[in-house]
Image: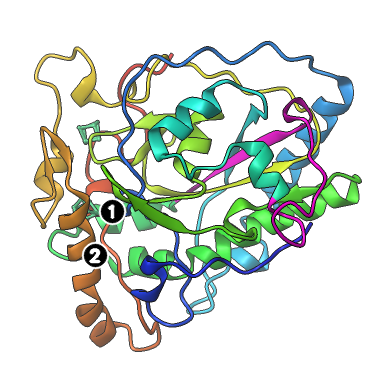
Amino acid sequence: MHVTSQGSTPAASSRPPGRPVREEPPGGNAPSPPAPPPPRTPARAASQDGAAVRAALEEEAGLFPSGPENLSPRDGGRIFARPFLGFAAGDDPAWFLVREAVGEGSWIPEEAFARGGAGPGARPAVPAPDLTVLAAVLPQTPETVARQGEATAMPADPWVASKYFHDRAVNGLMLRLAGRLAALGIEAVVPELAEGYGTFPHERWRITSSWSHRHAAWAAGLGTFGLCDGLITRAGKAHRLGSLVFRAAVPASPRPYAGFRDWCLHYAPVPGGCGRCIGRCPAGALSPAGHDKALCRDFLYGTRGWAQGRFPDLPGADACGLCQAAVPCATRAPAGRP
Ligand code: SF4
Ligand code: SF4
C-alpha cells in the first residue's frame, strides 16, 4: 500500500497545525445528499476467494478494539467499540450517484485506487470490477454515548477525547486492514491518505471532498443519512467512519434501502415524525428543513476556546456531536431497517 500526504486545501489552512482535515459527521462540510432512488447493488460473482478475503478482514476488524491504535494515550481506555464492515463493488453504478451528490471532484473507486501510487496516473489503471470498497463503522463506546446524552451546551469529556484521537483510531484500523490485505497479496489504498486527497469548493455545499466516508458507507449498505446529515447505521449514528479501496472482488453487502434517507424518522411515514436532533443542537443549525453546515461549523470551531481551557493536554481540540446522542437514532436505526 502506498500512503502519501494529503493535499493542501483552504479548509486545511483553517485547522490547527498538525491536525488533518477530515470529514466531520455531522458537523462537517460533506454535502447533504439528494434523494434519487439508487439502483440496486449489481449482481456480482461471489468467488470462494472473495469470501475468504472478506472473512479475513472481518477477523482483523475484531482484533481492533484491544489494539494499540484504539487505546487512548490519555487514559489507556478504548476509544471506540468493535467496528463492523460493509463492502461495495468497484463497478456499482451507485458510485455515479455518489459523485452526483458529493460533486464532480468526488472520486469513483478506480480514481481513488489510482491515486494510491507515487503520483496521479502513476499506477496502471485497474478495471472497476476488480476493485472493492470497504467501509467501516467505529461505534462510540456505550459509556461515551451515555455521557454525551447527558451533555447539553457542550460535548461530554469522553466525546471530545474520542474526536481528538479519531484519526489515530480510524486510520489505524484502515492501515491494519490494509496490512492484512497486503499479507494476502492484495493492494489497498486509503483514499483519505492518497495523493491529491482534499476538499474543494462546491457551489451548493460550499466545500466538499474527494472522498466521502459517509457516502462510501451508504454504498456499502451500512446506513442512510439523517436529518442532521449523520449516517444512521444499524448501531445508530454515534460513531466514526473509515473506508479503503482494494484490488480484489469480494461479495458486496446487501443495500437494504432504496434512498439516501430511509432510516431517519423525519423522512419516514411515522405519526409525529421525529426531529429530536433539532432540539439537541445548541447552535440552531438543525431545523425541519435540514442541516445548516455553516452554523454547525461555526459552533464547532467556537468550542476550541472552551476545549483549550478544559483539555490543555489536547491542543487544538474541538467537538460537538450533541445531535448524535439522546436521540432515537443514537444507537440504532429507528426507521425503515428490515
Ligand atoms: S433524531 Fe430523528 S430526525 Fe434526527 S436524524 Fe435521528 S431519526 Fe432523524
Ligand atoms: S448539535 Fe448542531 S452544531 Fe453540534 S454537530 Fe449537531 S448540527 Fe452541528
Residue 74 point in image, percent of width and height: 48, 79
In the image, the residue with mark 2 has its CB under 8 Å from the nearest atom of ligand 2:
yes
Q: Which residues are magenta?
A: 115-139
Residue 291 horizontal side relative to residue 220, left or right: left
Residue at image location 33% in from the left, 74% down from the top? 14
Q: Secondary structure at mark 1?
A: loop
Q: Is residue 131 magenta?
A: yes
The quadrant of the image that shows the C terminus is: top left
Q: Which residue does the numbered mark 2 point to in the structure image?
A: 300
Near mark 1 (Cα within 10 A), the count class, few <14, some 14-19 or many ≥20, is: many
Helix or strand or loop: what does disc 2 sit on? helix
Q: Say whether mark 1 is within 8 Å of ligand 2.
A: yes
In this view, the residue in front, 17 or 202, is: 202
Quick check: marks 2 and 1 in contact, CB under 8 Å? yes
The three-letter code of the residue at mark 1 reads Gly
- The type of residue carrying mark 2 is Leu
Residue at 12% in and 63% down = 153
Point out the image quarter for the N terminus. bottom right
Q: What residue sits right under mark 1 in the picture?
A: 27
